[in-house]
Amino acid sequence: MKAFLTTGLCLILSIPVSTVWGYAVKEIAGGGTIQGTVTLAGPVPDPKAYNLVIFPDPEYCGRISNGNGWRLLRDFLVNEQGQVLNVVVLLEGVTEGKPFSLSVPRVEARDCRFSPFTTVVRSGHGIEVVNMDPVMHDIQAYETSTAMGTRVLFNSPLPFNHRHQRGDLHATHDHRPGESLVRQFQLSKKRRTFVMQCGFHAYMQSWAIAVDNPYYVLTDENGQFSIEGVPPGTYDLRAWHPGIKQVMKKQVTIEPGGNLTVDFQLPSPGRRKTALTVRTPPRFTPAALGREFTIEPLLERQ
């Protein structure tokens, strides 16, 4: 199995750039910088809530919970000034420039949460998933779009990490990486959104947008971004967040050695219609499993 995974990863990394993307590595003189800030216009949406009792491993996964048996999925991370963390800001239409690494992005399953929540992928390449937990996960990956719906890319179990001693799952323990799961995938034409979910724990999600050049970055905790060494020219600058359905683009022109500031305001989805809300009292309690136990947020109280 290890030989198969290693060989597959090597094959993915050895695909020529020009063959897959049509992007050429070229030394650029007079590259410019595009910087700015991404803010959320409107209220921060409520997090999605999942009753831990109806999913496997409620005690272990409940180490991150709200204190009443619910795991919250906060897809919008916004500071007090409304600035948004982990928005992917990317340039579209760049055909040559700085080296474009073909590294396969790594996602960790840690404390029943995929990290990072947002990232980038490369169609025709792949993704690596590592289980850091003493419980089993199931990787379900899809491509999706608002207009064309969803298509399954792959579905693979992520086995229990045998490097852990289960013992008292409530106890703090060192996360040790299990065996890597590497899967190659090809997105359909005009589809760029990739989403991965755990088939056992629905609150475990990771989202990505496919990029075809190295001019992208994720916003920091202040919603700020900076893309440097941009070849002079006119491009579309896009801000992408999985919770925003509207395509947020601005046409930009970067002059040789220029420094351009471009800010984005993402429209808030507001109050979303979803059944994933905290209910008091919950419909299901630990008694539904035939035993009494307590879900304690020993790692993080949400």
Image: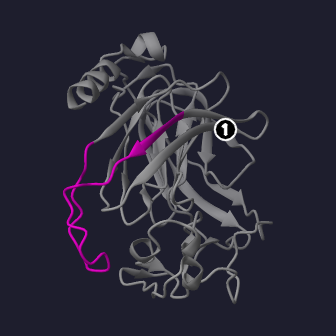
Residue occupying image coordinates x 52% and y 60%: 201
What residue is at 35 percent from the left and 27 percent from the top? 102
Residue 9 on image: x %, y %: 30, 26
- In the picture shown, does residue 189 fall above or below 274? above
Q: Nearer the viewer, residue 155 or 9?
A: 155
Q: Is residue 33 visible?
A: no
Q: Main secondary structure of the magenta part?
A: loop
Q: Is residue 187 found inside the magenta-colored segment of the image?
A: no
Q: Residue at x 60, y 80 (%)?
A: 288
Q: Is residue 210 placed above or below 15 in the rendered structure?
A: below
Q: Residue 122 appears at what percent x and percent y?
A: 47, 30
Point out the stretch of residues depicted in magenta: 154-179
Q: Is residue 173 magenta?
A: yes
The answer to whether 281 appears left or right of 273 in the picture is left
Locate residue 252, reporting x and y percent. 62, 36
Q: Amino acid at mark 1?
A: Thr
Estimate how packed mark 1 is, as few (under 14), some (14 to 19) or many (20 or more) residues with alpha carbons within 10 Å.
some
Camera-nearest residue between 273 and 87: 273
Residue placed under numbered mark 1 in the picture: 144
Task: Tell me if I can see residue 107 in this picture.
Answer: yes
Q: Residue furthest front?
A: 290
Q: Secondary structure at mark 1?
A: strand
